[in-house]
Image (cartoon, helix red, strand yellow):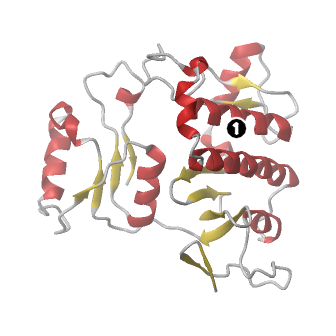
Amino acid sequence: MASQSGFIVRSQMSTSSSSEKGFSTLSEYMGEGGIGLGDELVLLFEHIQYACKRIAALVASPFNSSLSKQSSFAGGDSGSGRDAPKPLDIVSNEIILSSLKKSGKVAVMASEEDDAPIWINDDGALLNWIIYPGRKKATLNSLQSGAKLVAAGYVLYSSATILCTSFGSGTHAFTLDHSTGDFILTHQDIKIPPRGQIYSVNDARYFDWPEGLRQYIDTVRQGKGRYPKKYSARYICSLVADFHRTLLYGGVAMNPKGPSSSSLRGKSSQFSC
């Protein structure tokens, strides 16, 4: 058992080939964890890890605020019904795109910072791509069935940087150890608790919600639901942060449809429960 950055890290590997450090890094887990990942996916995640570390360093930098002063990022509304992109959003998007290009294992990238999916190259071989010309090709290849997913995940940038991922056999969280630059397995096989006690929704829009949703929130807030617990509100307005908390502690996170239903955000519904 080892202490890293104020929290306890327990060994998640028992094989003799595990690192002398006594715990598993993301690279070790993918390479030796017995989960049968192909070399191409392992290589891709190495590039994703690198991008995440660059973004984490940018988030933690005292010079981060200077990004807002760069005129190339200035601007108002995005013109597509979304909030205007922030400078850090744009820089992070460029870092991710650069890493995916360099991996040589990705054919198309879709991001909310771009108006349409970006076609990267024809050599990305992790999926069977549909071949169409130009922008249409990128869009159609981004709309494949979720049943074809080989991996999914997100990264939370906060006081700790946490990369949470699943390769189809459980969900695992890896926390960045800044002293070594490794993502360390800190939460293995995460499962949402059967019942939570937190609801995550923008209460400022209460009177814009459907009547049924208002009744539900009133009920759980007063502890008059099926389970006699008074729910507490926690709302960060970040899908990753709100989802991550829900994954660990249970509850419900939502972004219900409001009067501005013409926007992409207005069409969003329940994220997790």
Q: Tell me: residue 97, above or below residue 261.
A: below
| Label 1: element kind | helix
Q: Looking at the rendering, which quadrant does residue 144 occupy?
A: top right
Q: Say which quadrant the C terminus sits in.
A: bottom left
Q: Nearer the viewer, residue 37 or 13?
A: 13
Residue at horizontal 69%, vertical 51%?
Answer: 53
Image coordinates for residue 238, horizontal then vertical, percent: 43, 43
Residue at horizontal 67%, vertical 23%?
Answer: 140
Residue at horizontal 86%, vertical 80%?
Answer: 17
Asked if residue 251 lies left or right of residue 131, the reply is left
Q: Looking at the rendering, which quadrant does residue 187 occupy?
A: bottom right
Q: Which residue is mark 1?
A: 96
Residue at horizontal 16%, vertical 42%?
Answer: 214
Q: Amino acid at mark 1?
A: Ile
Q: Looking at the rendering, which quadrant does residue 108 occupy?
A: top right
Q: Count residues near mark 1 (Cα–Cα under 10 Å), then give few for <14, some for 14-19, many for 20+.
A: many
Q: Is residue 107 visible?
A: yes
